[in-house]
Image (cartoon, rainbow, N blue to C red):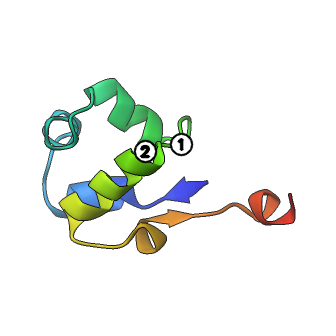
Amino acid sequence: MRNDIKALRTDRRWSQAELGTALGVSRQTVIAIENDKYDPSLPLAFRIAAVFGSSIETIFHPDDEDLSA
């Protein structure tokens, strides 16, 4: 799954640590999500969407292989 978290975060001039604090997760978790190494849980995805004032669907995008499974 791909996501736009890094772009959204940098547009707001937030550090990874600041976003992590806002989400209640570590900076390392933010890094892993931004680098598509970790797919967040559904509750965390909802918190991410809320922090950015957006919907999950506009932040997260399935890979083509995710759609064919």
Q: Which residue is mark 2?
A: 34
The residue shown at (37%, 30%) is 29
Other residues around mark 1 within 10 Å, as few (<14) / some (14–19) / many (≥20): some
Q: Nearer the viewer, mark 1 or mark 2?
A: 1
Amino acid found under the numbered disc labelled 1: Asp
> From the viewer's perspective, is 68 left or right of 44?
right
Element marked by disc 1: loop
What's the residue at 78%, 66% (across, down)? 67
- On the image, numbered disc 1 is attached to which residue? 39
Determine whether label 1 and label 2 are within 8 Å by CB. Answer: no
Q: Quadrant of residue 63?
A: bottom right
x 45%, y 33%: residue: 32
- Asked where in the image residue 2 lies, by quadrant, the reply is bottom right
Which residue sits at x=36%, y=46%? Answer: 44
Quadrant into which the N terminus falls: bottom right
Side (left or right) of 61 relative to 23: right
Image location (x, y in percent) of residue 39:
53, 42
